[in-house]
Image (cartoon, rainbow, N blue to C red):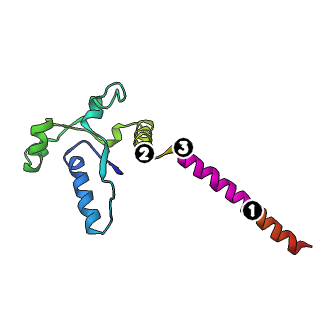
């Protein structure tokens, strides 16, 4: 699963489809799909996890209101939008970590890390032995 983040606005709403089309155009395969993990309306409404997000919503500028391309957004969400910057760095980091960990076998990753460590130690010992042969 690949993830993306974006603003909670018209363009952010369309980003997943746009990225899929761009990946296809450039021959990039997204095996398990692409999911927008933030910023979503659900996150704006989750005042327990993200107490300040809804307070940071902005109003569309007067000129944007009349644009036909914003009509669907305005009909569904009103005159508000929010920037991805509304997340604190810690909130964004936790959001990414939480979503990545859903797809990573941490136990397996730790085992691989231990295996890599022991392989490096073995390789280092071997190289030390080879260097010592030439030192004699």
Q: Would you identify the image quadrant in which residue 102 lies?
A: top left
- Mark 2 vs mark 3, foreground winner is 3
Q: Nearer the viewer, residue 8 or 103?
A: 103
Q: Who's the residue at 69% across and 59% down the image? A: 120
Residue 100, given in percent of the width and then of the height, sits at: 42, 45
Would residue 120 be found to the left or right of residue 99 on screen? right
Secondary structure at badge 3 equals: helix
Mark 2: few, some, or many residues within 10 Å (few <14, many ≥20)? Answer: some
Q: Who's the residue at 89% across and 72% down the image? A: 135
Q: Nearer the viewer, residue 51 or 85?
A: 51
Residue 21, given in percent of the width and then of the height, sits at: 23, 61
Residue 109 within the segment the image draws in magenta: yes
Q: Residue furthest right?
A: 136
Q: Main secondary structure of the magenta part?
A: helix
The numbered mark at residue 116 is none
Residue 129 within the segment the image draws in magenta: no
Mark 3: few, some, or many residues within 10 Å (few <14, many ≥20)? Answer: few
Q: Residue furthest top?
A: 48
Q: Is residue 82 above or below residue 5?
A: above
Give the Cα separation between the discs numbered 2 and 3: 14 Å
- Sequence order check, earlier mark of 3 and 1: 3
Q: Is residue 97 above or below residue 24?
A: above
Mark 1: few, some, or many residues within 10 Å (few <14, many ≥20)? Answer: few
The numbered mark at residue 107 is 3
Q: Would you identify the image quadrant in which residue 46 lies?
A: top left
Cβ atoms at labels 2 and 3 below 8 Å apart: no
The numbered mark at residue 100 is 2
Residue 23, given in percent of the width and then of the height, sits at: 29, 63
Give the Cα separation between the discs numbered 3 and 1: 26 Å
The numbered mark at residue 124 is 1
Residues in magenta, as a range: 108-123
């Amino acid at each position: 699963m690949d993830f993306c983040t974006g603003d909670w606005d018209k363009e952010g709403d369309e980003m997943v489809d746009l990225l899929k089309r761009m990946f296809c155009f450039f021959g990039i395969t997204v095996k398990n799909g692409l999911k927008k993990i933030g910023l979503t309306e659900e996150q704006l409404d989750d005042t327990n996890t993200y107490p300040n997000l809804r307070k940071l919503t902005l109003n569309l500028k007067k000129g944007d209101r009349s644009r036909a391309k914003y009509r669907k957004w305005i009909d569904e969400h009103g005159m508000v939008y929010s920037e991805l910057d509304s997340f604190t760095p810690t909130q964004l980091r936790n959001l990414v970590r939480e979503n990545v960990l859903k797809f990573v076998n941490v136990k397996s990753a730790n085992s691989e890390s231990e295996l890599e460590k022991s392989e490096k130690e073995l390789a280092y010992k071997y190289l030390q032995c080879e260097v010592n042969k030439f030192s004699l």
